[in-house]
Image: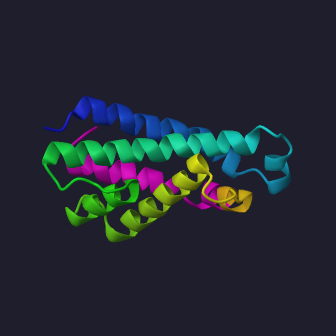
Amino acid sequence: MIDEPRLNAILARIKEETDHLRPLAKLTDDELEASSETIPAIKYRFVVAIEACVDVARHIIASEGFRPASSFADAFKILREHDLLDPDLAAVMQQMAGFRNILVHLYLTVDEEEVKHNLRTNLGDFDRFRQMIAKAIGAS
């Protein structure tokens, strides 16, 4: 059974993280690079937001008895398979899961241009994720 209060709290956390990122998305590259703390803070907030999305997906998967996810990216694929995410958003969220892995595990050198690109182009995808999940589960 889906724990709506728990999911609502996690969805609120996603909003909180993206709300902190939005003003930074408006800054120029020079402004973002003016402090040695800004880019690391952006990376951290992305990690938290992406992991919160994964937490939502995994909770739904377990609660609904869907097949277990083999990876963070697979969790979003499973939500798509059950029509809880549209194909475009599922693909974006799968890419964001990969981005999270790069940030956390340093599989590759983290390209600050990719961080800035995601900052300026993907925040709306987190909003869409929250809205689609809330609608699908009847959460507030």
Using residue 83 as the reference point, say whether residue 32 is left or right of it. right
Q: How many marks?
A: 0
Q: Give the residues drawn in magenta, as a range.
A: 117-140
| Residue ID at (86%, 44%) | 34
Foreground of the two, 23 or 39: 39
Observer-nearest residue: 129 or 61? 61
* Camera sees residue 83: yes
Quadrant in which the N terminus is drawn: top left
> Is residue 18 at least partly visible in the picture?
no
21 over 91 or under it: above or below: above
Residue sitting at 22 percent across and 63 percent down? 83
Q: Main secondary structure of the magenta part?
A: helix
Residue 98 picture location, percent across and down: 50, 59
Q: Picture quarter containing residue 14?
A: top left
Q: Check the image and name the residue furthest to the bottom.
A: 87
Q: Tell me: residue 87, above or below residue 61.
A: below
Q: Quadrant of residue 67?
A: bottom left
Occupied quadrant, residue 52: top left
Most foreground residue, 90 or 98: 98
Residue 31: % across, % down = 83, 48
The C terminus sits in image quarter: top left
Residue 131 x/y as whole percent: 35, 50
Above or below — where is 75 with respect to 37?
below
- Inspect the magenta stretch and tell me whether residue 4 lies in it: no
Which residue is drawn at the image coordinates 62% and 52% (left, top)? 106
* Residue at point 29%, 46% (across, down): 58
x and y percentages locating residue 3 in the rendered image? 21, 33
- In this figure, which colouring scheme has been used for the structure? rainbow
